[in-house]
Amino acid sequence: MRYAALATVAVAVATCVAAPARAQDVAAPSRPSATATTTTASDSALEAQTTAVASTLRCPVCQGESIQDSPSDLARQMRIVVRDKLRAGNTPDQVKAYFVSKYGEWILLDPTMTGLNILLYVIPVLLVVGGLALVAILVRRWTAPETTTQ
Amino acid sequence: MIGLLAHNALLVSLAAVAFGAILTPVAIRTGRQEWLQLVYGAVYTNFLLVSVAAGSMVVALVTHDFSVSYVAAVGSRSTPLLFTIISLWGALEGSILFWAWVLGLYSAAVVLLHHRRPGNLVPYAVMTLLAVAAFFAILLVGPADPFLPVFPVPADGPGPNTLLQNHYLMAVHPPLLYLGYVGMSVPFAFALGAIFSNEAASNDWSILSRRWMLASWGFLSAAIIAGMWWSYGVLGWGGYWAWDPVENASFLPWLTATAYLHSVMVQERRNMLRLWTLNLCVATFVLTILGTFLTRSGILSSVHAFTTGAIGYYFLAFIAIVLVTTLTLVAGNSERIQTKGKLGGAASRETVFLLNNLFLTAVMLTVLVGTLYPLVAEAVRGVKVSVGVPFFNRMALPAMVSLLFLMGVGPALPWGSTTWADARKRLYPPGIAAVILGAIAVIAGARSIYAILAFAFVGYAAMSNLREFWIGMRARHRAHGESWPTALVRLVAGNRRRYGGYVAHIGVLLIALGITASSTFRTEREATLTPGQTLTVSGRTVRLKNLWGREEPQRSVIGATMDVVGKNGAIIGTLEPRMNYYRVSDQPVPTPDVSSSWRGDLYVNLMAFDSGGANATVKVIVEPFVTWIWFGGLVVVIGAFIGLFYSSRGTGAPALATNSASAGPTVANADP
C-alpha cells in the first residue's frame, strides 16, 4: 500500500515488457493458403506480414537500415523475395531462416535469443528489476526513523 | 604554406596546454597563486592557436588549397561554398580540429567566467580541461593531422561525402552536437576539480557545473533533433531514428546528462546522491568520448564512420586513462564525498527522481549494450551479428514509456514528503488527460499497447506539467490580482530553473507525441506512375506531372514534379522529389520532398524512373504529427534557455537544504 507508486510503475513496466511479445503474435499470423486468390483482405494481410518480416531484415548495402525502410534496389528485390516466399506458404521464421542461410546471422536486425545473445535480453531486464529493488530498499532505508540507520 | 603555419600553431598549442596542465598542481602545492595566471594565459593562448589552425583550414578549404591533405581529401572545386565551409567537420581530421576548437572555446569561457572564484576548484577544473585538450592536440599533430603536405598538388578533390552535402542541416547539426558533446567536458572537469581540491562534499562545485551541463544538454538536445530532421530529409524512408550506432552515440550522454540534471537537485536539497551525481558527470564525459570513438574510428560501420588507422587506439587508450584515473580518485575519496542525507518520505519528488535516474540509466545501459554487442559477438563467437531497430524498440521502449509516466508524477509531488492521501489528490487529476488521450489513440486505430500507453502517459504528464503553471498563475492572480499573462511571466521569472524544467518537459512530451503518432499512424504506398496518373495514400492524393533532369556543377539531378491534389480536384501544392547523382559517387542520394503542416507531413520520395521519362516510381508516406517533433525540440531548447538564466538568489534556492538532513518540512514549504 505504501509503495503503491512503485508498484504502479512496476506493473506498467511489466505490461510494456510483455506487450511486444503479444504484438508479434498478432503481426505474424500463420497463413497457410494464399495462392492467387487476390481478395483485398488477404492482400493487405500479406502486405502487413511482408512489412513485419522485412522490418527485421537488414539491407546488406545500407547503413543498418532494414530492407523495409531502405530505398535501395537490392532492398526492393529482397522485399519481393520475402513477399513471394510468404505467398508460397512459408512462415515468417522460414523466410528469415532462408536469408540467414544466404547472408549469415548478420542479416537479422533482431538477434536470436540463443547462446551469447541471451545476454542482450537478460542484462536490461536484470538492470531494471535489480534497480527497482535497489530503489525500494534505499527509499525504505532513507525514510526509516533515525534509530535504524547508523 | 598555410598548412605549415597551422601545423606549427597546433604544436605550440600542445606545448601550451601541457605546460598549463603540469603547472597547475605545482602552483597550488607550492602556494604560488600568481603562477595560475600563467595557466590561464595558456588557456587563452591555446584558444588563440587552435582558432588560427581552424581558421587556416577554412581558408584552405575556401581557396581550394589542395596542398593541404584534408582539403585534398574532402574539397572539390565544384562544391558550393556553404558545403565547402562546413566540410570542416565533414570528415575525421577536420572534426577533431573542430572539437579542439570548441574545447578551447569552452575552456577560455570557464576561465573568463570563474577565474576570480577563491579556492582551488577552478584551477583544478582548468587543469582537467587542459589535459583533455592535450589529448586532442596530440591527435591533431599525430594520427589525425589535417595539415599534412600533399605532393604533387592535385588539381581537384573528390568533395565531401555525398550524404553530407545534400542537406543544409549539415551546417547546423554537427556544430550543435559538438557544442553539446564538448560542453560536457566542463562538468566533468568540475567534478574532478572538486575531488582534487577537496570540495566534493560541498555543493559549490555542482552549482558551478550544472549550468554548463544544462547549456550542453540544450545544445545536445537540439543536435539530436536536428540530426533526426536531417535523416528524415536525406535518407528517403520517411523515418528519423533508426537506432544507428551514430544516433545511439549521441543519445547515450544525453541520457546520463538528463539523469544528472535531476539527481543534482536531490543532491542540493537533500544532501544525498553526491557520489552518484558525480559519477553521472564522469559517465557523461566518458560517453561523449566513447561516442566519438565509435563513430570516428570506423569500428562500427555507419554513415559517419570514416575508416582510419591508428586513431582508434588513441581513443581507447584515452578512455582507459580517464576511467582508471577517475575510478581511482572517486573510490579513494568516496568516504569523504558521500554524505548521509535522509528523505522526508516515500511519497515525494525525490523518490520519483530516484526512479527517473534508474530508468534513464537502464535505457542508457541497454542502448550501450546493444550498440557494443556486435563487437563482443564478433570477438567471442567470431560471427557478425546485427542489433537493430526491433531489438532497441523492444528493450528500450518500456523504460522510455515509463519515463513519460514519471514526467507526470514528479512535478505533481512536492519535495520533502506528503501524505499518501495528498499524493493521490495531486496524482489523480492528470489521469483524466491520460484516459482521454489513450481513448483517442484507440479510436484512431492504435492497437499496440506501447503506443496506447505512450499516448496516455503523454496526456498525463502534459496535464501534470501544465497544471503546475496553472496552480502558480492562479495563486498569483488571486493574491496580487495580476492579469493572467503577467502572472505567467512573473511566475516563470521568479523560479526560472523550475519552470524552465517544466517547459523542457513539455517539449519532450511534444516530441514523444510526434514520434508515437507518426510511427503508429504512418501509412505508405509505393507505385509506378505515368504522367497524369494519381496515387492516393490515406486521403492525400498526388499526381505525377512530369520527369525532368538538370545539370549542376557538382551533380546531376533527376526530379519528378508531382501535383498535390485537393479533395475537389484542385491543385493545392507541388512537390519535387529528386535523385541527386554526385560526380564522386555511384550511389544516387535520394532527396525526398515534403509538404508539412501541424497535422503532419506528406512525404514523397522518388524511388526509380524510366530514363525516357515515361514513368516514375514514387513512395508516398503520410506521417501525422511528425512536425511536432521538430517543434518539441525547439520547446526543449527554450526550456533549457529559461533554466540557464535563473538567479541563484531566487525562490527555491537550493542552498537551503545543504545544512541539515532534518530540513524536510522547511524545504517542502520553500517550493509550494
Image (spheres, rainbow, N blue to C red):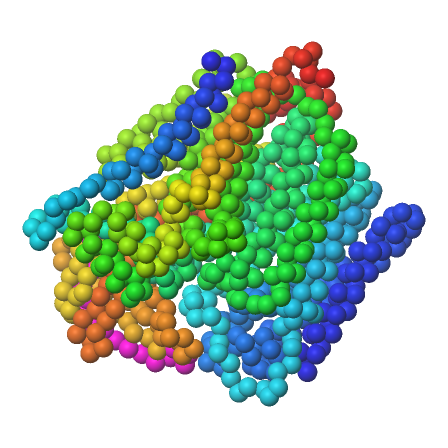
Residue at 38% over, 25% down:
B431
Whether residue B196 is visible to the viewer of this picture, yes or no, is yes
Residue at 26% over, 49% down:
A94
Residue at 20% over, 72% down:
B546
Question: How many numbered discs sit on the rendered protein?
Answer: 0
- Residue B453 spot, x, y in % from top left: 35, 33
Segment tinted magenta in the rendering: B537-555
Q: Nearer the viewer, residue B145 or B550?
A: B145
Whether residue B477 is visible to the viewer of this picture, yes or no, is no
In the image, residue B291 sits, relative to residue B274, either above or below, namely below
- Residue B72 spot, x, y in % from top left: 56, 79
* B556 relative to B72 in the view: left or right: left
Q: Nearer the viewer, residue B381 or A126?
A: B381
- Residue B204 spot, x, y in % from top left: 73, 37
Q: Nearer the viewer, residue B457 or B245?
A: B245
Q: Main secondary structure of the magenta part?
A: strand
Query: Where's the C terminus of chain B, which quadrant?
Result: top right
* B151 relative to B468 in the view: left or right: right
Q: Nearer the viewer, residue B123 or B333?
A: B333
Query: Where's the N terminus of chain B, which quadrant?
Result: bottom right
